[in-house]
Image (cartoon, grey):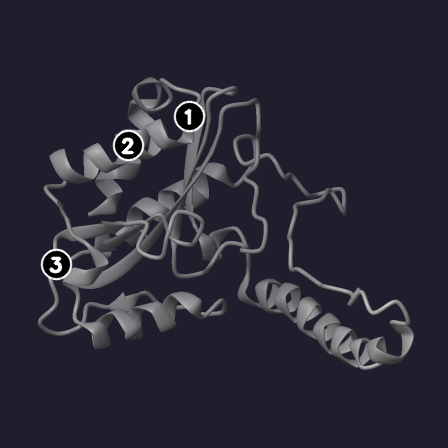
Amino acid sequence: MLDKLFKSLRADKPNYLGSKKGSDFEDRIELFLRRDLSLNRINREDLDEAVWKSINNHLNDKLGEDFINLPANTLNSCYIYQPRGSQEFPDFLIFTKKKVIPLEIKYSGKKQSSPIWNSNIPKANAFYIFGSYGLSDITFFRGNDVLTSKHRKSLYSFFDSLKSVQDKFRKSMPVLDLTNRGFSPYIRAAFEQKNHKRTVCINFFSHPDRSVVERRAIEESSRL
């Protein structure tokens, strides 16, 4: 299903990149979902509470590998926009006749060649669309094609180990805090892409594997 969206993004970039605003970019994608894929927009409240809890637990699994099987007696051929809020993953939750597919949108009004990841790196079982107004380009990919499971696990484990150091250090705070102000260290996970070796290319548009990951996204999404 989503393969048609990806093909449209590749064939008609000017139509999607007509504004610097990320909200306009998302609106154009949502229009395609409704008009061209005939998907109905529903609300999270339209789902059975137990079904939503199961889906939400799956979305919270940062190391998950597989797409969610569509729960029995659940609406299909529909989508939810920002199911967990405007600042939370994913931007769209697509319900096909087989699966529940997270779709995350990344957009920049500047000449930006890679997305901003903040505390969430690409999930294996999600699709991503990245558009750059300044560079007049759009690309798309499945998370497991730009980050291996082993690398993903290692990145998250780094902050898990720091959390234990933080907790241990905080035990000394009551003794050190003679002014009673409550200052204490706070570790927040954040990720970026760095040219840490010669073969690295952080530019999503000029990366040598771009055509490969786009083709895989189209092929995989056509089966879901």
Q: Distance between the residues labelled 2 and 3?
A: 21 Å
Q: Position of residue 43 (x, y in %)?
A: 19, 54
Between residue 84 and residue 106, name the one nearer to us.
84
Give residue 153's quadrant in the image.
bottom right
Nearer to us of marks 2 and 3 is 2
Q: Determine whether 14 is above or below 80 in the image.
A: above
What residue sits right under mark 3 in the picture? 76
The answer to whether residue 36 of the structure is visible from this angle is no
Give residue 113's quadrant in the image.
top right
Residue at (88% x, 67% y) in the render: 179
- Mark number, residue 21: 1
Q: What residue type is labelled 1?
A: Lys
- Left or right relative to 111: residue 83: left
Residue at (67% x, 73% y) in the render: 160
Dot placed on the residue nearer the N-terminal end, 2 or 1:
1
Helix, strand or loop at disc 2?
Answer: helix
- Mark number, residue 40: none
Residue at (70% x, 43% y) in the render: 199
Q: In which quarter of the image is the C terminus?
A: bottom left
